[in-house]
Image: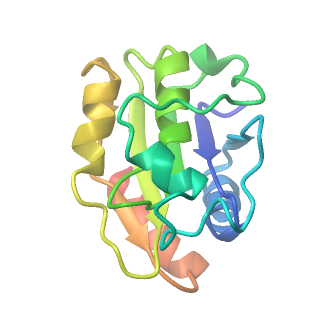
């Protein structure tokens, strides 16, 4: 077993592809953050002020329920954490993951997918959510197609 886990949330499949490629390159184990209540296209409509995702992101205390927790997380030293950028930050269900797992002493490497938005202060938010007990590296945003070569260059610079 590797000491690397790639954790990701991917309601549309975009982030999943990047997560799978990182896991392949780093020989890491995958864990998908799956909400108890799956997101529909209507839920993800950022233009609708009453959509589920908009309401969740407007409530800083919102923690959507996960279908399951990551088992044996204590066995991993490095966690790549992937998600789409919503409203300039990680989705609330990623906050649920961070709240529900003991990440003390771990290195967290965020990555996100976005058609245009940057990561903003997402790494700092993750640092705060882990109560500064994990080492949170600066994240990386990917838009559009991501090549294995680009991922390898980024990871080689990290490790």
Q: Residue at position x 71%, y 68% from top?
A: 41
Q: Farthest front residue?
A: 50
Count of marks, rendered view: 0
Where is residue 48? Give x, y as percent. 51, 68
* Residue 123 appears anywhere in the view: yes
Is residue 74 shown above or below 81? above
Q: Residue at position x 30%, y 49% from top?
A: 122
* Quadrant of the rendering where the N terminus is positioned: top right
Q: Quarter of the image holding residue 133?
A: top left
Which color scheme is applied?
Answer: rainbow
Where is residue 63? Give x, y as percent. 52, 29
Where is residue 159? Give x, y as percent. 39, 49
Is residue 63 shown above or below 94? above
Question: In the drawing, does residue 115 fall left or right of residue 53?
Answer: left
- Relative to the observer, which residue lies in front, 137 or 113? 113
Q: Quarter of the image holding residue 42?
A: bottom right
Question: In the drawing, does residue 4 fall left or right of residue 158?
Answer: right
- Relative to the observer, which residue lies in front, 42 or 26? 42
Is residue 132 shown above or below 148? above
* Residue 91 appears anywhere in the view: no
Q: Residue at position x 39%, y 68% from top?
A: 141
Question: In the drawing, does residue 82 fall left or right of residue 136?
Answer: right
Where is residue 135? Give x, y as percent. 29, 30
């Amino acid at each position: 077993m590797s000491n690397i886990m790639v954790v990701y949330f991917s309601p549309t499949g975009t982030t999943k592809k990047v997560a799978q490629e990182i896991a392949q390159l780093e020989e890491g184990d995958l864990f998908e953050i799956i909400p108890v209540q799956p997101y529909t296209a209507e839920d993800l409509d950022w233009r609708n002020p009453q959509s589920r995702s908009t309401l969740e992101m407007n409530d800083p205390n919102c923690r959507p329920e996960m279908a399951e927790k990551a088992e044996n997380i204590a066995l991993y030293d490095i966690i790549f954490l992937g998600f789409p950028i919503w409203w300039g930050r990680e989705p609330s269900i990623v906050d649920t993951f961070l709240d529900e797992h003991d990440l003390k002493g771990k290195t967290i490497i965020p990555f996100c997918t976005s058609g245009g938005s940057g990561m903003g202060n997402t790494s700092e938010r993750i640092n705060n959510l882990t109560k500064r007990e994990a080492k949170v590296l600066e994240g990386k945003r990917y838009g559009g197609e991501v090549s294995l070569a680009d991922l390898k260059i980024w990871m080689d610079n990290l490790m």
